[in-house]
Amino acid sequence: MKKKREAPIRVVERVQTGVRIEKRLLKVLKALAEYHDLTVGDLLEGIVLHAFDGLCPFSKKSLQLIQDLKRIYHLDLDATASHRLIEASEQIEAGEQQEASKPRRARTQ
């Protein structure tokens, strides 16, 4: 069993943020945070700090739990979707813009 390295307690200043995030992804994050008895903010800080150091923030057990939670919450996204997500309203607008830019055929009578 790996022993966690002990790091000193650090005093920080946290700020409230209005981050928008995919709905099912947030459900998985909330469930994972609840499982580990953390706030979503603490979980995200840990994920980001590990990622910044090039480390995986999750144990094998947590990775399995994440797969289970993704299945429960119908989250079918993976890393390939990163930076490739648009909101449904943006998709509709893009479709309308595409339609408007198509050349119109003259009606025959």
Image: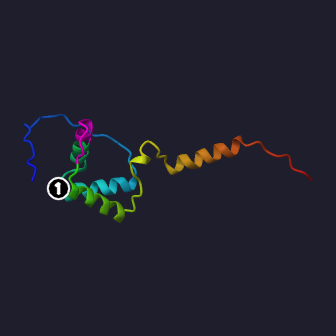
Residue 82 horizontal/vertical position (percent): 41, 44
**Tally of numbered tags:** 1
Q: Residue at x 28, y 55 (%)?
A: 30
Residue under pointer 1: 37
Q: Which amino acid type corresponds to the residue marked 1 in the rendered image?
A: Asp
Name the secondary structure under disc 1.
loop
Q: How is the image coloured?
A: rainbow
Please tell me in which quadrant of the rendered image residue 70 appears: bottom left
View extreme (right): residue: 109
Residue 14 horizontal/vertical position (percent): 21, 37
Residue 62 horizontal/vertical position (percent): 23, 56
Residue 106 horizontal/vertical position (percent): 85, 46
Q: Residue at x 9, y 38 (%)?
A: 7
- Left or right, residue 18 beside residue 87: left
The answer to if 59 sits in the magenta stretch is: no
Q: Between 71 and 87, which is closer to the camera in this rendering?
A: 71
Q: Residue at x 17, y 55 (%)?
A: 37
Q: Which residues are magenta?
A: 48-57
